Amino acid sequence: MRSAMMFVLFSAVCVAQVPARPKPTDSDLSAVRGEWVASRVEALREEVKDAKGLRITVEGDKLMMSGGGEKKERYTFKLDSSKNPKVIDLYQDGKLISRSIYAHEKDELRLCFGLAHYKGTLTSDTEREFVSAGDRPTAFDSRQGVLFVLQRGKGK
């Protein structure tokens, strides 16, 4: 009986010490939900001129990017608001394609997508200046990834 009691106590202590991966709070999900319009897009500290009119729509765990002369891109995403900066990972067809970061303040959303999302669209000279494919940016700096500054659109 005593050994059974010790096992139960030991198990409870071990389980209590393993932190569960935090889920994004409802406020994180509702904060990014809706339509966003690009006010600025930068790569390598230069504004991407043809990105004006780019729209990002977030519904549930789905993110759709359209406009800016590009075809519509659809992704699923996962948020982790326990990190600093907050983390957003983008998936396409179940495959991780971009380890990214996000920040939300009032009606502004900032995203910095890691290179994996844009691999192949930049010249080889500029690719060296980005983080390695699959790495996550550590700051909202267009030398680490492609920086999107978005304003809330008409619908929330």
Image (cartoon, rainbow, N blue to C red):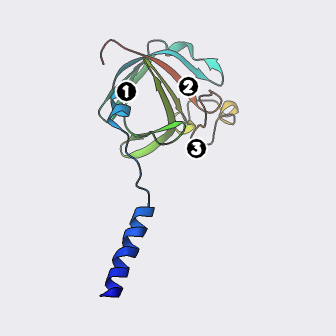
Of the numbered discs 2 and 1, the one sitting upstream in the chain is 1
Residue 64 or residue 139, whichever sits in front: 139
Label drawn at residue 82: none
Could you tell me which residue is drawn at 36 percent across and 30 percent down? 63
Numbered disc 1: secondary structure: helix
Quick check: 155 above or below 60? above
Q: Which residue is mark 1?
A: 31
The alpha-carbon separation of the residues under discs 2 and 1 comes to 19 Å
Q: Nearer the viewer, mark 2 or mark 1?
A: 1
- Quarter-wise, where is residue 5 in the image? bottom left
The alpha-carbon separation of the residues under discs 3 and 1 comes to 25 Å
List x then y, in percent, for residue 9.
37, 74
Q: Which residue is mark 2?
A: 147
In this image, 131 relative to 85: left or right?
A: right
The amino acid type, in three-letter code, at marker 2 is Leu
Q: Which residue is mark 3?
A: 135
The amino acid type, in three-letter code, at marker 1 is Ala
In this image, 100 relative to 139: left or right?
A: left
Could you tell me which residue is drawn at 58 percent across and 43 percent down? 135
